[in-house]
Amino acid sequence: MAGNFCSHCGNAVSPMAAACPQCGHPVADQQATQQATQQAAQPAVGQPLANPYTPVKSRVTAGVLGILVGGLGIHKFYLGKVGLGVVYLLLVWTYVPAIIGLVEGIIYLTQSDQDFAKKQGVRVA
């Protein structure tokens, strides 16, 4: 007995048996059942992977932050892009981040939620 048991009554069953000797219930091959379960759990090709740990962010909040305080990179910090936020802070004296932040804020506000989520790598609230 290699650890095969009847799924109906729990009786130990021979690996070669087609049915349980106790209750007569047909015995499925456990290895084939496990492989089928593992294959069924895999997403289909082209199907996006849903990550429950992706942060939820608001497109409107990111847009407003980009317009109002984009020069400081606050909208980048909000979206979890800390490296870009630091770059904006380091270059704030040039006013270039302020212009870029304004443009990005307008882009965020005019994008659809799906486009925003895809490009920013977040779930939209």
Image (cartoon, rainbow, N blue to C red):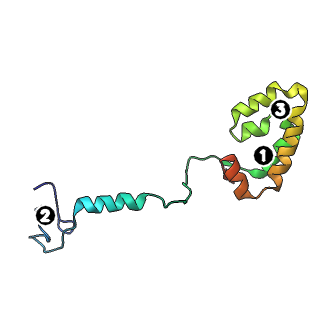
Q: Residue furthest bottom?
A: 24
Q: Label 3, secondary structure: give it.
A: helix
Q: Residues within 10 Å of mark 1 (few under 14, many from 20)?
A: many
Query: Rounded to the nearest whole Å, what is the CA distance between mark 1 and mark 2?
Result: 60 Å
- Given the image, on which type of amino acid does mark 3 rest? Leu
Place of residue 69 in the rendered image (x, y in percent of width and height, measured from the top left): 85, 37
Q: Observer-nearest residue: 15 or 72?
A: 15
Question: Which structural element holds mark 1?
Answer: helix
- The quadrant of the picture occupied by the C terminus is bottom right
What's the CA distance linking mark 3 and mark 1? 13 Å
**Given the image, on which type of amino acid does mark 1 rest?**
Ala
- Above or below: residue 64 compared with residue 97: below
Q: Is residue 119 left or right of residue 39?
A: right
Q: What residue would you read off at disc 3?
A: 72
Disc ID at residue 9: none
For marks 3 and 1 on the same chain, the one whose residue lies earlier in the sequence: 1
Question: Residue 62 got which mark?
Answer: 1
Disc 3 to disc 1: CB gap under 8 Å: no
Which quadrant of the view contains residue 81?
top right
Quarter of the image that includes the N terminus: bottom left
Q: Which residue is mark 2?
A: 11
